[in-house]
Image (cartoon, rainbow, N blue to C red):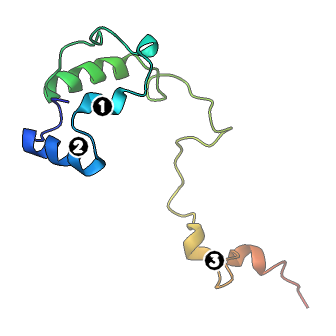
Amino acid sequence: MEYIPNTADDHRAMLATIGVERFDDLLKEIPASVRLSRPLAVPPALTELEVRREIGGLLDRNVHADRHACFLGAGAYDHAIPSIVPSPSESCSASGIPSWFASGPKNSV
């Protein structure tokens, strides 16, 4: 548990709170046949900068829509709307229905 910045006194206090003397006492109910008897095979710790580089390299291997054609979204993709077209919030009445839709056809009398 070296990655947790607790002191030895902190460990003793936590163990005392739950009623055990040692960390291994928490594991005694787990049969030895299913416990790992060797250290985990994990690579050494990396600095934050090394992790960012590693993750960045992995992310660069992904294919994304900025570099390739994207057909996700069934036609909902990056597009331009001319500024002459009002946004829905500008053209909606208090009921939330666009005024150009709710007004209906104009009758000439």
Q: How many marks?
A: 3
Query: Left or right: where does residue 7 sit relative to residue 69?
Result: left
Label 1 crowd (10 A; few <14 / some 14-19 / many >=20): few
Q: Could you tell me which residue is drawn at 52 percent across and 48 percent down? A: 80
Q: Residue at x 64, y 85 (%)?
A: 94
What residue is shown with label 2? Answer: 15
104 sits left or right of 71 in the view = right
Q: Residue at x 65, y 82 (%)?
A: 93
Residue bearing mark 1: 25
State the separation of the CA atoms marked 2 and 3. Answer: 63 Å
Q: Quadrant of residue 24?
A: top left
The quadrant in which the N terminus is found is top left
How packed mark 2 is, by other alpha carbons closer than 10 Å (few <14, some 14-19, many 20 or more), is some
Q: Are marks 1 and 2 in contact (CB under 8 Å)?
A: yes
Name above or below for residue 108 compared with residue 68: below
Pinpoint residue 48: horizontal percent, then vertical percent.
16, 29
Q: Which is nearer the eye, 106 or 19?
A: 19
Q: Nearer the viewer, residue 62 or 20?
A: 20
Element on which disc 3 rests = loop
Can you give x and y, in whole percent of width and height, for residue 64 in the image? 46, 26
N-terminal-most mark, 1 or 2 = 2
Tell me the amino acid under the disc marked 2. Leu
Q: Residue at x 75, y 73 (%)?
A: 101
